[in-house]
Amino acid sequence: MLLLLLLSSLAHSTTPNNLFKDSTLAFDQTGAVDTKTSLEITIQFRIWSQNITSSDLIYLKLPRFSRSTYTQGKDGGAVGQDIAMGSAYCGQAANSAAIQLGTNASGTILWDTVDSTPLVGNGCQEMSSCNLHGTCDYCYNTCTCDMGFGNPATEVYEYGSVRIDCAERTCPKGKSLRDLPVDGDRAHADSECSNNGKCDRSIGHCTCFDGWEGLACDRMICPNRCSGHGICASMKEQAGMSNAFPLGRNVTDRVYGRTPLSRDTVAWDYDTMYGCVCDSSWPVGLEWGEWQKAEWHGPDCSQKRCPMGDDPVTKANETDCKGVTPTGSTESGKEGNGCVVECSNRGVCVYEEGIGTCKCFEGFLGENCDTLSPYGMELGEWFDPAWDE
């Protein structure tokens, strides 16, 4: 590269504010960058505050004339890699503050910005100068878009391509439930709207498919919003809840997706999959004074259990859950732990608008069917005067 230094005048001043006065750069080439053509640079300046001698040096700083932020391009390579100045050069915006002149006349290098410089390269003009939502890489005339705007050099988008001029917004991303694994232990990559919705590029907003919610459609909606009789909790949250199923005693040590409950690493869906933890008027768990079933139940907590009680016929106490392991659990109830026995095993639970009521078998009475009936059967059907009122 040919560099011509034209010193218009040398003067000494005690004013330390600026090194140079009336400094300008001129280039002999504008428009599209030709990576095979050298660029001639003319520098014109007057010394303002330093004495320059024959042993002093004057420096020219042209940031990104020899480095690129991108890996693409036939003369490119790794990000930040030097580009041979004889074969390629990069540009700068007009009057760029990054272009500086300096001298070591004071013993250390002091820098000052150049007052006036032209545009070098086309400045991504064919991409509307990145639409004010990105930075032009003058090495390759490629836009590096701001966060929230399209940048296909580093991102992959579903549902159509994203414009490369930073004119379109991108949407929040989350782990994809539906993508294919890329190898034996990598899957569920981050995707726009988590592949559970569509992106409105005019505003950068996800419209989620049914069953999903969140800014990135990255959370599963609980069934029927738990019907107002429970809370919607993630798998990670439920792992630390003593009343979530499957039940476990050492909830402070439980982490969703760790041995022995599952794998050796945290499960990918710990903050994606959600489920209902139903309400109960009695404490739920495996400890003393707790019961192994909640009062409200069902996937959406829409059903209230029938009254519970001990079977009046058997000698055993069916409500005693000491040593009993609930479904799906690896632990059993402690001393004083209770089993929920609806209708005392002597009736069926009938639901009306989600509220359970016991329909007792023949010969049994009470709201929980725990009392032997003195009335017996009538014509082969269950008979209880309370049901005939």
Image (cartoon, helix red, strand yellow):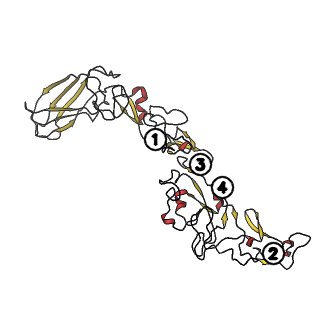
Choose mark 1 or mark 4, whichever is in front. 4
Query: Dot 2 corresponds to which residue?
Result: 364
Query: Dot 1 corresponds to which residue?
Result: 148
Q: Is residue 103 visible?
A: yes
Q: If you read the primary sequence from the N terminus, does the residue marked by circle 1 or circle 4 appear first?
A: 1
Disc 1 element: loop
Q: Is residue 286 left or right of residue 298?
A: left
The image shows residue 218 at horizontal and vertical percentages of: 54, 48
Q: Is residue 310 above or below residue 215?
A: below
Q: Mark 2 belongs to which amino acid?
A: Phe
Q: Is residue 388 left or right of residue 144?
A: right
The image shows residue 99 at horizontal and vertical percentages of: 25, 33
Query: Dot 3 corresponds to which residue?
Result: 212
The image shows residue 54 at horizontal and vertical percentages of: 7, 30
Q: If you read the primary sequence from the N terminus, does the residue marked by circle 2 or circle 3 appear first?
A: 3
Disc 3 element: strand
Q: Mark 2 Cα within 10 Å, few/some/many (few <14, many 20+)? A: many
Q: Which residue occupies 24% across, 24% down?
A: 26
Disc 2 element: strand
Query: Dot 4 corresponds to which residue?
Result: 224
Disc 4 element: helix
